[in-house]
Amino acid sequence: MFKAILIEKDDAGYRAQLTELADDALPEGDVTVRVAYSTLNYKDGLAITGKGPVVRKFPMVPGIDLAGTVEASSHPDVAVGDAVVLNGWGVGEGHWGGLAQRARLKGDWLVPLPSAFTARQAMAIGTAGYTAMLCVMALERHGVTPDQGEILVTGANGGVGSVAVAVLAKLGYTVVASTGRPDEADFLKTLGAAEIIDRATLNAPGKPLARERWAGAVDTVGSHTLANVCASTRYRGTVTACGLAQGMDFPSTVAPFILRGVTLAGIDSVMAPRAERLEAWQRLGRDLDVAKLELITSEIGLSEVIDTAGRLMAGQVRGRVVVDVN
Ligand code: NDP
């Protein structure tokens, strides 16, 4: 038997609970992992609270991330005892996930735990931090360099946002952090933000083009915020879009793209190819200061997951939450 969060949906409604499951209930897969840590991402919050249509099969063990040790494997490249990390691939959505003491998965989905990190640190990073790195890599790929000017990070106190602020600052970029929690300004400055702006300046309907300010941006918020960020991005700048914390809509015009040559780079972490994942994790090992990572991390147990998911959805959680599943 092992402990897990289980989401069910039936005539009695949509509900999540901490429960005990038998090993033979685990789904099919060629690798079984003893989970050490998981984490709570925005998507896990949507899944656990039922606020978004994340879960595609019931009953479901949520948790889009896990770190642990391989207990059994018939995969040629994965050996018993390997320390591994999993992010995405639909785990916690259509295949049982990491908010459990045990998981059975496809070996192809696993990456080795990077030598720079412990299992707990890898989950402090999680999908949120790995996505932040994918955003930074996309800015670099599109030629955004520190000498070009300010980089805006929206949703800066969230998981993706706080890791993006820390990594970009370490790489020498001048980071402007947009947040709805100005009382966390000191925290964001400790992470490396040069300036804090109120998200209220970005989240209402704006003009198709505004004063050019950002050389690049990491947007975790979508909706009017993303439209306004594009409208105020400098000639030939790049905006990476990875999130929808304000909304799924994108009420923009083509003006920033056809008049200023702005690039809108979409970021998806779930199905990102393995080579890019390995690069992102290697870059995190080099470009994320683990002392800063510790600052943005809080830890909970499995029994606190459901309450914390509610607070995450209410925008009350700062930075990253790791879950010690044992
Ligand atoms: P968090 O909940 O940790 O952070 C989201 C942040 O967005 C909040 O902390 C808050 O920041 C801000 N925010 C919340 N509500 C609003 C609102 N109504 N208007 C404007 N800003 C708001 O989530 P994550 O960092 O884990 O994820 C951020 C987004 O990125 C989510 O939408 C998530 O689904 C998406 N995502 C996408 C991935 C991909 O592969 N494309 C992978 C990972 C995440 P503040 O308090 O500073 O204003």
Image (cartoon, rainbow, N blue to C red):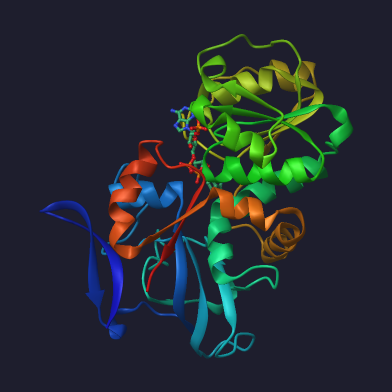
- Give the camera-side residue of 319 and 15: 319
Q: Quadrant of the N terminus?
A: bottom left
When asked about the image quadrant of residue 24, the answer is: bottom left
Residue 44 image position (x, y, % from top left):
40, 52
* Callout count: 0
Q: Is residue 208 visible?
A: yes
Q: Tell me if residue 21 comes above or below residue 242 in the rendering.
A: below
In this picture, residue 201 sits left or right of residue 259: left
Q: Quadrant of the C terminus?
A: bottom left
In this picture, residue 11 sits left or right of residue 182: left
Q: Is residue 219 visible?
A: no
In this picture, residue 61 sits left or right of residue 159: left
Q: Which residue is situated farthest in the left direction here? A: 12
Residue 38 image position (x, y, % from top left):
45, 64
Residue displayed at 77% across by 45% down: 170
Residue displayed at 65% across by 34% down: 189
Q: Tell me if residue 114 comes above or below residue 178 in the rendering.
A: below
Residue displayed at 25% across by 77% down: 21
Residue 2 image position (x, y, % from top left):
30, 79
- Give the camera-side residue of 4 and 207: 4
Q: Tell me if residue 148 comes above or below residue 117 in the rendering.
A: above
Residue 54 image position (x, y, % from top left):
38, 50
Residue displayed at 75% across by 58% down: 283
